[in-house]
Image: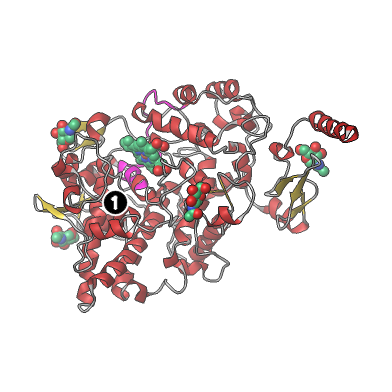
Amino acid sequence: MIRSIAILLLLHLTLVLCGEGNPCCSQPCQNRGVCTALSSGAYDCDCTRTGFYGQNCTNPELFTWLKVNLKPAPNTVHYILTHFRGLWNIINKISFLRDGIMRYVLTSRAHLIESPPTYNSDYDYKNWEAYSNLTYFTRTLPPVPLDCPTPMGAVGKKQLPDAKQLAEKLLLRRHFIPDPQGSSLMFAFFAQHFTHQFFKTDMKKGPAFTRAINHGVDLSHIYGEDLQRQNKLRLLKDGKMKYQVLDGEVYPPLVSEVGVDMHYPPHVPESRRFAVGHEAFGLVPGLMMYATIWLREHNRVCEVLQEVHPHWDDERLFQTTRLILIGETIKIVIEDYVQHLSGYFFKLKFDPELLFNSQFQYQNRIASEFNTLYHWHPLMPEDFHIQEEVYSYKQFVFNTSIVVDHGINHLVDSFTHQIAGRVAGGKNLPPALLMVAIKSIENSRQMRYQSLNAYRKRFNMSPYSSFEDLTGETEMAAQLEEMYGHVDAVELYPGLMVEKPRTNAIFGETMVEMGAPYSLKGLLGNPICSPEYWKPSTFGGPVGFQIVNSASLQRLVCNNVKGPCPVASFNVPDVKEASSATINSSTAHAATSDVNPTVIIKERTEL
Ligand code: HEM
Ligand SMILES: *[C@@H]1O[C@H](CO)[C@@H](O)[C@H](O)[C@H]1NC(C)=O
Ligand SMILES: *[C@@H]1O[C@H](CO)[C@@H](O)[C@H](O)[C@H]1NC(C)=O
Ligand SMILES: *[C@@H]1O[C@H](CO)[C@@H](O)[C@H](O)[C@H]1NC(C)=O
Ligand SMILES: *[C@@H]1O[C@H](CO)[C@@H](O)[C@H](O)[C@H]1NC(C)=O
């Protein structure tokens, strides 16, 4: 008895002498090796298939050594892709080169995402519950163990900085900083609209949980999360969705007519409570604008399909149209949205066939970290300029009247011409959205996120060596140092927001190198991209397949507004050339990131 107590005491002593309880807190396993704490107080790194060996998985095997030494740094690759326009113009036209590069982009990015998924915010080891319970977001890095000396593991201060003070000092906007890549509000609201189909935190259960259990591009934001909601939104005739006509134009139906739950504050009149797939899309007119455009697109595609298959019933028309709209969405996201965001001169291509000879899992699970990094609220401007009006946040938020009073035409035109804010670089968050940022810092802490530098290592970047290295300046760096003590203790979300942007870019390196893998895996992991789905018959034949393969933001708009259609673009068109350009569907081309390829330009009278 006494002896065993003595042994226990001795053991305890050695542990205390060794420093702390859990040896995995200091993240000793490198290169994606898996750390297991042993009862002896030691740890084990499982280096299987990492390409490295040794106690901490730090010794490269020969092939790994070659790869590591030959592979250019992410910033180098980015530099090449965003320079040498002339060279890229040639490469873009040589199809085997374009295909080869696109295949490399897809595989090199998607391979960074575990598939099947592994951890979640309640499990830092692999197990069946974490794999199979779809109500959780997955986790790319496991949570920091509970028994660690500091919130970030073993480095940094015992207490993290006050979230509110942190956000006010480093994130809050002092004066509006426009995005140097020229992103428009059309881009910002697309981002919000598109991502809210799979970022749907279940606030009742907590930040670790999601209500979007399909974990991907399922268009639940158009059709509703479950069958009950879908059936209420469907016309149940000709495959169409319910709608109403106001001022001769199609808009979503009213909550009072269809009886689905929507989140509106009391002051919104019944006649302006539109009902769409996502409960929260009354929040801003930008979301309701896109909801309206996609609703019109659904009903338009139904008519096209019905023409080809007059004998099809409502169900088949509806289901096939949904697949076509999923295809259109992925096409637009890759070739318009990601193309714009990347700033690449290389022309991205949506072509699922590129992956048919590679090992690729057609499944996806949304990671909590992906949700967190996508909190791009600095995109939002100081106020919103629509036609001749200027709306403050107070006037804009939950004001669905704006959608009808201005009409889709003018909204597209106005949002295309208003520039969005820069996301990285710090101090560009509109005061109206400060609370949202504070909340995401608090949620990240509750879920015990690892540090920015831990995520940099996970996504093949070298960790920042100092605070100045992270911010690229001295003032915020000094404030960060005071708050965090050590650069390895800087949290993910604040880190992403204050990171030095790349030259003339909206984001820093980490946002792109983390975001792109999640994004491309989610897009190409969709079942419609798999070999058995990706063929004309899935989409109702060549006509439907063609709608998918020729989709663009500009076409989407032109096909769904009356009269001459406005330029619709993710970057603000060059003011001199196209501020009041109009364009019609016969001139709207599927292609590219180009601002105004074939637009008819009306002379701008003031210039
Ligand atoms: C005026 C415009 C906007 C307002 C008022 C707004 C407001 C909000 C609010 C209140 C939340 C919930 C925060 C929480 O309780 O955790 C939220 C979440 C979020 N916002 Fe925004 N936001 C706006 C624009 C945007 C934009 C342009 C994006 C671009 C991507 C965006 C991305 C997100 C994401 C990804 C979430 C997490 C969603 C979830 O997990 O359910 N937001 N926003
Ligand atoms: C492994 O990491 C630990 C802690 O970081 C360190 O003390 C040890 O020397 C490392 N072992 C090797 C073989 O590098
Ligand atoms: C998923 O996990 C949560 C939290 O433990 C639990 O409440 C829920 O019932 C689980 N869902 C399923 C489908 O197992
Ligand atoms: C909502 O927008 C309309 C214009 O469409 C405007 O007249 C009205 O004042 C706005 N409502 C609020 C509460 O600001
Ligand atoms: C669309 O533009 C083309 C090319 O300028 C023109 O020939 C055609 O008449 C226009 N169509 C409509 C409906 O305005």
Q: Residue at x 54, y 34 (%)?
A: 445
Q: Is residue 458 visible?
A: yes
Pick the front one: 396 or 207 = 207
- Asked if the magenta segment contains residue 181, the reply would be yes
Crowd class of label 1 (few under 14; some 14 to 19; many from 20; radius 10 Å): many
Tell whether 585 sits left or right of 45. Answer: left
Q: Is residue 125 placed above or below 93 in the rendered structure?
A: above
Question: Residue lying farthest bottom?
Answer: 311
Q: Residue at x 37, y 24 (%)?
A: 175
Q: Is mark 1 within 8 Å of ligand 5?
A: no
Ligand number 1: quarter of image: top left
Q: Is residue 380 placed above or below 75 in the rendered structure?
A: above
Pick the front one: 519 or 119 = 119
Amino acid type at mark 1: Asn
Tell whether 316 sits left or right of 429. Answer: left
Q: Give the magenta-colored segment's residue range.
A: 171-191
- Asked if the magenta segment contains residue 532, the reply would be no
Question: Residue lying farthest left?
Answer: 247
Q: Identify the residue position indicated by label 1 in the image.
A: 596
Q: How is the image coloured?
A: secondary structure
Which quadrant does the C terminus fall into? top left
Question: Residue lying farthest front?
Answer: 1
Tell whether 468 sits left or right of 236. Answer: right
Which quadrant does the N terminus fall into? top right
Residue 459 x, y percent position in the rendering: 60, 47
All told, the count of numbered labels is 1
Q: Secondary structure at mark 1?
A: loop
Question: Residue lying farthest right?
Answer: 3
Which of the 4 image quadrants contains residue 155? top right
